[in-house]
Amino acid sequence: MSSGSGRGVWIGAAAYTIWGLFPLYWKQLEFMPAGQIIAHRIVWSFVVLVPVLAWATWRSRRDGTAAVGVAVSSASVGVYTVAALLIAVNWFTYVWAVNHDYVVETSLGYFITPLVNVLLGVAVLRESLRPGQWVAVGLAAGGVAYLTAVYGAVPWIALALAISFGTYGLVKKKAPMPPLPGLTLETGLLFVPAAAFLVAADVRGDGAFGHAGALPTMLMAGAGVVTTVPLLMFAMAVRHVPLSLIGILQFIAPTIQFFLGVFLYREPFSRSQLVGFGLVWTALAVFAMESWQQSQLKIDRFEHRNID
């Protein structure tokens, strides 16, 4: 593993740890509609990112290093518009679910996201699946089907989170701009409608900012920092780490979320759910082991060529 990939792994692991702890933050704002929380995330993220991008651009010019930003073309705007819409859908689904006591189901969504990444690789990047990967995908599909039967409905929260974030990762993998200007453009594309939504809510008397007490107001503004830091870390990691390895790191966040949901928030978790989750966890174990074996084979082949 190169030094860049090694650093990317640590950055990715830190990003997923922060995401795993997110329920602790958003639960403090559960009295607010999810739409307002997401609008604040967008607005304050943009407010944070603009000066950070300006500082980074000034520093790169002063030091004579490569420019931070790149020219914004119509094609790049199209890519980042898709990315912005995907992450907005993901944010809304997640915050709504957390604040309606579905933390355990959100963890299921992020448990199956790595396997969605694999399927996207097949469908979009024309990658071929190895036998072990097919086994993992089949087990996960069985787990989701079983939970659908147990719930009496499709676990739409989990599937919406997995599909939206998996597709977002794919788009970011192909995005033309560096992480910082790219994320700034994403939030900038959503800034005006989000700000207009918050202004309209305040005019109607429904706005919470500045009217719900000092701590909630600070948490709303702080959403910019807690949102942008892990997203920037993720954007940095995904450019240097294979998508399959990003999928393995993804296990960190849902594991933390699952334990928070079951042991801190006391959400129900029945034996029937354990069977469904067990199939998904078995799929992830198979997937992780198969990916590790393949990486070891690549290392062995590389070292063998160097010896020869």
Image (spheres, rainbow, N blue to C red):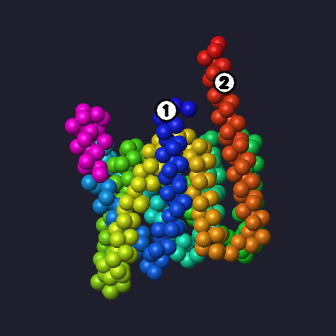
Q: Residue furthest top?
A: 308
| Dominant secondary structure, magenta | helix
Residue 103 against residue 78 in the figure, above or below: below
Image check: 53 left or right of 267? Answer: left
Residue at 45% of width from left, 75% of height from top? 29
**How would you rate the neighbour count of disc 2 (Cα within 10 Å): few for under 14, some for 14-19, many for 20 or more?**
few
Label of residue 60 in the image: none
Label of residue 3 in the image: 1
Among numbered discs 1 and 2, the one appearing first in the sequence: 1
Q: CA distance from mark 1 to mark 2?
A: 19 Å
Q: How many marks?
A: 2
Q: Which residue is mark 2?
A: 301
Can you give x and y, in whole percent of width and height, for residue 110 in the image?
60, 59
Q: Residue furthest bottom?
A: 205
**How would you rate the neighbour count of disc 1 (Cα within 10 Å): few for under 14, some for 14-19, many for 20 or more?**
few
Depth check: 214 or 119 in front? 214
Depth check: 91 or 274 in front? 274
Is residue 28 among the parts visible in the rendering? Answer: yes
The amino acid on which the numbered mark 1 sits, given as a three-letter code, is Ser
Find the magenta span and give its range.
Answer: 52-68
Can you give x and y, in whole percent of width and height, for residue 147 in the image?
73, 68
Point out the frontmost of discs 1 and 2.
Answer: 1
User: Which image quarter holds the C terminus?
Assistant: top right
